Amino acid sequence: MDHTALSLIQLGVVFFALGVLGRLASRFGMSPIPLYLLGGLAFGEGGIVPLGGIGDFTHLASEIGVVLLLLLLGLEYSAAELFTGLRRSWTAGIADVVLNATPGVAVALLLGWGPVAALAMGGITYISSSGIVAKVLGDLGRLGNRETPVVLSILVFEDLAMALYLPILTALLGGVSLLGGMTAVGISLAVITVVLLIALKFGRYVSAIVDSPDREVFLLKVLGAALLIAGLASAMQVSAAVGAFLLGIAISGSTAENATRMLEPLRDLFAAMFFVVFGFNTDPTTMPPVLGAAIGLTVVTTLTKIGTGWWAAKRQGIGRMGRARAGAALVARGEFSIIIAGLAVSAGAVPHELAALAAAYVLLMAVLGPIAARVVEPTARALTGRLRSAPATT
């Protein structure tokens, strides 16, 4: 069969299967990320029916997916909101880093994967899934709850931490020298600082440049700017994802709202391809040996995320039920964890088992997170009722 015809057939199968999986996930009220990963595992390396001939397209599509994920994440915040959230949540943010990155670092070191893999695993277990958290809060009608600003502040801190973490990780994965690594970090800090200042002082001008009353022109300008900035950022060793995130922050007001509304379908399409491609490149036969570590990390980091949210909400004077909801809302891991694992594995600087561990971990956490957010309140109420009805002992 002609190569082009075969590629079109395979892409058609992939996209249609993604639609079916997304529909299935929505019916059960869960994130589609675990199903996309499973689909990639089934049709990738070592899977049931490996697909070949679409590697170039899927690789580029997955890169665009990362750019769009981070661009729309940045569009959710203004620079002023980022600074406000950072001031409000910096202590909880530091506790979040320590509690949730440490288990990943420890497991990588215990498995003998080395310090670079340990840094990557720390990021994988640290970062919550902003996309899953936001969707769950909306689905459960908790956007107006008292604890929700606490949750969002922690997510803001995590996103800013990623803006510093990803360039450092990228430099180390590239095997640069200490001087080169420090230079890359310095450039990253300078770029991030300049962009945030521009967003804070001149964001309306950035918005005016990309804005247009014509939908087609507007879409082309925003998407083109995102890809251009992401490419330039990558060339400067600042991570394409961070470049897209910073551009999103610089766009504000009605322009950001229009961009979000128009780009969401594209984001969902290419992001789905990103998760599938990660599954393609992960051999499922490598997962059983690391399944025990994945389950252990799931248990530990579920407890540490709940503890982070509980403590942060308590500091804001929120009651026990709100503290429990805040902690459970932060449990899910997803897109950022896979982005980190993808960067690490594609660079060839870490063992391939890291991809298997990351895939198994994200599969578990992306399923467990929404479930925890849904059941935490009735579970807490049931436990409180039992404690109150228990006879007093003398």
Image (cartoon, rainbow, N blue to C red):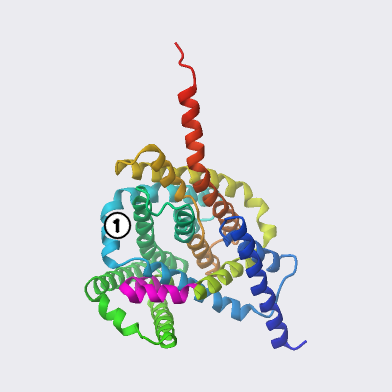
How many marks overall? Answer: 1
Is 310 above or below relative to 363? above
Q: Residue furthest right?
A: 1
Region rendered in magenta? 244-264
Query: Which image quadrant: the C terminus?
Result: top left
In the image, is 121 to the left or to the right of 77?
A: right
Is 129 above or below relative to 301? below
Name the residue that disc number 1 marks.
Answer: 85
Q: Where's residue 151, x and y in %? A: 38, 52
What residue sits 37% from the left and 55% below the top? 152
Q: Quadrant of residue 250?
A: bottom left
Indicate whether residue 247 is drawn in magenta.
yes
Q: Residues within 10 Å of mark 1 (few under 14, many from 20)?
A: many
Q: Quadrant of residue 172?
A: bottom left
What residue sits 60% from the left and 62% below the top? 352
Is 272 above or below relative to 27? below
Indicate whether residue 204 is drawn in magenta.
no
Q: Where's residue 201, x and y in %? A: 21, 73
What residue sits 45% from the left and 57% below the top? 138
SS assignment for the magenta stretch, majority: helix
Task: Report if residue 367 is visible in the image.
Answer: yes
